Amino acid sequence: MTLLTADAVSVSLGGGQVLAGVDLGVAAGEVVGLIGPNGAGKTTLLRAVAGLLPLDAGEIRIDGRPVSRIDGRTRGRLLAYLPQGGAPQWAVSVETLVMLGRLPHRGPWRGPSAADRDAVARALDACDLAAVRQRPVTRLSGGERARVLLARALAGEPRLLLADEPVAGLDPAHQLDVMATLRARAAAGTGVVVVMHDLTLAARYCDRLVLLDAGRTVAQDVPAAVLTPDMLARCYGIRAFHGQADGQAVIVPLARTRDGPA
């Protein structure tokens, strides 16, 4: 079942066009990776899907409804947006911050329910944070804080999860854990859209990849059909090693190519 549909989406920021006629479809239970060089429009597309940016043209629908017509509370229950580079400034406990992800599910002036506490506990476990649940967020490392913000998004149990570079700044073990968590959420029926720069992780964990360059869709297909030598040279300006380990793809950038971007 198609959960998210973006048709011919165009967005301008600061007087310049950032997205030009981009299409995106995400089914329930699917992990779709957004890849492309810096400035390609990946973050802008996520923000537009979340209803945080106006469109110049096109339409974005969630469950068949235009996102612009979904009220904020309902949107908060349908989707969670995890931006890149978030840095909590409040000295609240990890558990308190993660509980904020349950706000769209709670009535006015009501405290957390048993269902809220259970959802938070599951999110903490999924992000390997149960042992620090009472620690102030300001006393965590940057990688730990990133996992707290992911846990907050997961706690809302959204039908659509938008994650912008969720493994940036994490050690290799937690990168694998985060990607496995996103796959597990998809297996439970959530639609996941994730911005990636690690091409090996993108190839291993995503069902499909959407390659953006200069605000346009260059390719949209299964990872093997997108991460070709020609595509990597054309959009990233790189030559890469393509191989396999444990039966899975390995893609390692080796050098720039002459026809790549400056």
Image (cartoon, rainbow, N blue to C red):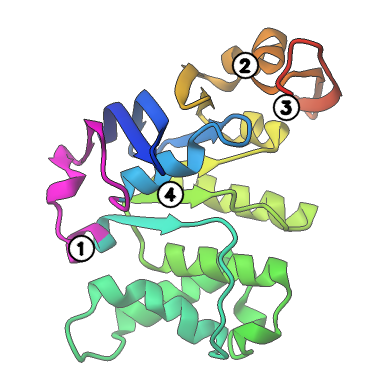
Q: Which of the marked residues, 1 or 4, is nearer the chain's N terminus?
A: 1
Give the position of the C terminus as an image quadrant.
top right
C-alpha distance separating marks 2 and 3? 11 Å
From the image, tell me which residue sits under label 3.
248
Q: Residues within 10 Å of mark 3 (few under 14, many from 20)?
A: few
Q: Residues within 10 Å of mark 1 (few under 14, many from 20)?
A: few
Mark 1 residue element: helix
Residue pointed to by mark 2? 224
Are the residues tagged 1 and 2 within 8 Å (C-beta)?
Answer: no
Residue 44: x, y in percent?
A: 43, 42
Dot 4 corresponds to which residue?
162
User: Marks 4/2: CA distance?
Assistant: 23 Å
Q: Amino acid at mark 1?
A: Gly
Q: Choose mark 1 or mark 2, whichever is in front.
A: 1
Residue in view at x 79 percent, y 30 percent: 246
CA distance for labels 1 and 2: 38 Å
Would residue 122 appear left or right of 233 to someone viewing this image?
left
Between the residue at mark 1 and the residue at mark 4, the CA separation in whole angstroms equals: 16 Å
- Of the numbered discs 4 and 2, the one sitting upstream in the chain is 4
Kindly check if marks 1 and 4 are in contact, taking CB atoms under 8 A apart as contact.
Answer: no
Q: Secondary structure at mark 3?
A: strand
Return the x and y of residue 244 as percentages of the image width and height: 80, 22
Question: Can I make out residue 190 in this image?
Answer: no
Sequence-wise first label, 1 or 2: 1
Query: Of discs 4 and 2, which sits in the foreground?
Result: 4
Q: Amino acid at mark 2?
A: Ala
Q: Residue 120 falls in which quadrant of the image?
A: bottom left
